[in-house]
Image (spheres, rainbow, N blue to C red):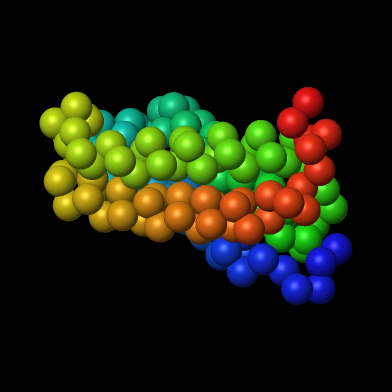
């Protein structure tokens, strides 16, 4: 474990963990929380009907975000090493960057989502992508090349 943790990766891990918790809170909060967080009216209505899909999809996103937090914290030296650190961190950064840049094509998104939601969520995701990118770049020399295999 690293006593001088990489601050960018700590921020990336904290952001991912907070996003995971927010997704779990949406499940617990029900239809109104789906609406408030911008998931769209179809998701809110499905949650109100008691459909499984909204909670399952939201829990799946929360699980992915939790794994991303674990990779960031592990690369920062706060958790034990995880497999394929370099590959995972690069992939996470690319996924976040792609999602964040989706704001450049807002009409390609679901029409039930407001532009405000698309803009703010993209800015948040781009900030998270920047934390992962900068932290990964700084930590790269300390991550074993064998992690690429």
Lateral position of residue 1 relative to residue 148, left or right = right
Q: Position of residue 3 (x, y in %)?
A: 81, 73
Lateral position of residue 4 relative to residue 26, left or right = right
Q: Residue 17 appears in which quarter of the rendering?
A: bottom right
31 to 4, vertically: above or below: above
**Along the viewing direction, whichever of 112 and 25 lies nearer the viewer:** 112
The reply to whether residue 78 is visible in this rendering is: yes
**Along the viewing direction, whichever of 61 and 83 lies nearer the viewer:** 83
Residue ID at (46%, 50%):
129
The reply to whether residue 55 is visible in this rendering is: no
Q: Position of residue 73 (x, y in %)?
A: 70, 57
The residue positioned farthest toward the front in the image shown: 141
Lateral position of residue 109 relative to residue 6, left or right = left
The residue positioned farthest toward the bottom in the image shown: 4
* Quadrant assignment for the N terminus: bottom right
Q: Position of residue 92 (x, y in %)?
A: 55, 40
**Along the viewing direction, whichever of 109 and 24 lies nearer the viewer:** 109
**Along the viewing direction, whichever of 44 and 48 lies nearer the viewer:** 44
Q: Position of residue 101 (x, y in %)?
A: 30, 41
Residue ID at (78%, 26%):
149
75 to 94, vertically: above or below: below
Residue ID at (26%, 55%):
120
């Amino acid at each position: 474990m690293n006593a001088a943790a990489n601050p960018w990766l700590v921020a990336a891990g904290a952001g991912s963990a907070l996003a995971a918790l927010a997704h779990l809170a949406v499940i617990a909060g029900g239809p109104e929380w789906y609406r408030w967080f911008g998931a769209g009216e179809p998701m809110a209505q499905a949650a109100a009907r008691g459909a499984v899909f909204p909670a399952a999809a939201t829990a799946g996103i929360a699980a992915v975000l939790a794994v991303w937090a674990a990779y960031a914290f592990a690369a920062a030296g706060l958790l034990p090493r995880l497999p394929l650190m370099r590959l995972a961190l690069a992939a996470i950064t690319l996924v976040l960057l792609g999602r964040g840049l989706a704001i450049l094509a807002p009409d390609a998104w679901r029409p039930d989502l407001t532009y405000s939601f698309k803009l703010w969520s993209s800015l948040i995701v781009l900030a998270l992508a920047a934390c992962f990118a900068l932290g990964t770049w700084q930590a790269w020399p300390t991550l074993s090349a064998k992690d690429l295999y």
